[in-house]
Amino acid sequence: MANQRVKSKEQRPKLRRRTKRKLTWAAVVLAAILVGSSVYLWSASRPGQWNRSLGNQHLGSAEEKHPPYNSDPPTSGPHLPYIAQWGIHTEPIVNELQVHNLEEGGVLVQYNCPQGCPDLVATLKTIVLRYPTQVILAPYPGMDSRIALTAWTRIDKLDDVDEKRIVRLRSGSFDSSRHTEG
């Protein structure tokens, strides 16, 4: 009988350690599931389509060879080491320049109007001018939609102005986790 008490007392610390270890692992797994679910739900609630990040390598010039972008207009990838001026542009911005603006948390609102669309441009200007920084309006000839909204790894294509979608993409675009020099 005394022998059994000794064994059970010797086994108790091992059992407690094992139980604590199992509880710790269960807590870690539960936390990972909660964080993963939260990130997924947040990402899914953002407008537009997600595109895999192509990194943020700096190029020496716009003519420097690099892998092709995975969206048109681009949403990430190799880019020039400086940004385009925020605001209204009347000429297209080369892809390698606009990507750095996206990396800096910006949103590009680009339009494709082969025959001209002064009413559309005027409406887009009104929206873009509300933001002194972080937003660019520019033409983008040849794309497959009339309007494209781009942020880092996000693209939303429209055929008509949808102010709520523009504002939603802009307000959800500021994520400094992607900004590392490279």
Image (cartoon, helix red, strand yellow):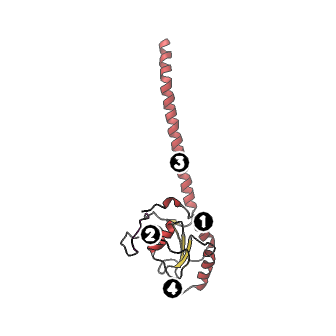
Q: Vertical placement of 19 versus 8: above or below?
A: below
Which residues make up the magenta segment? 55-61
Number of the front mark, 1 or 4: 1
Instruction: For the residues labelled 2 and 4, say whether their Cβ atoms are less than 8 Å apart.
Output: no
Number of the front mark, 3 or 1: 1
The C terminus is located in which quarter? bottom left
- Read off the residue under disc 2: 81
Q: Amino acid at mark 2?
A: Pro
Q: Vertical placement of 161 versus 77: above or below?
A: below
Lower position in the chain sequence, tag 2 or tag 4: 2
Lower position in the chain sequence, tag 1 or tag 4: 4
Q: Residue furthest bottom?
A: 115
Q: Which mark identifies residue 139?
A: none
Label 2 neighbour load within 10 Å: few <14, some 14-19, many 20+: some
Q: Amino acid at mark 1?
A: Ser
- The residue closer to the viewer here, 68 or 126, is 126
Dominant SS of magenta comes to loop
Residue 41 visible, this angle: yes
Q: Secondary structure at mark 2?
A: loop
Residue shown at 57% from the left, 85% from the top: 117
Residue shown at 47% from the left, 18% from the top: 7
Q: Amino acid at mark 3?
A: Ile
Instruction: For the residues labelled 2 and 1, say whether their Cβ atoms are less than 8 Å apart.
Output: no
Q: How far, Cα to Cα, is label 2 from label 3?
A: 37 Å
- Read off the residue under disc 3: 33
Lower position in the chain sequence, tag 2 or tag 3: 3
Label 4 neighbour load within 10 Å: few <14, some 14-19, many 20+: few
- Read off the residue under disc 4: 114
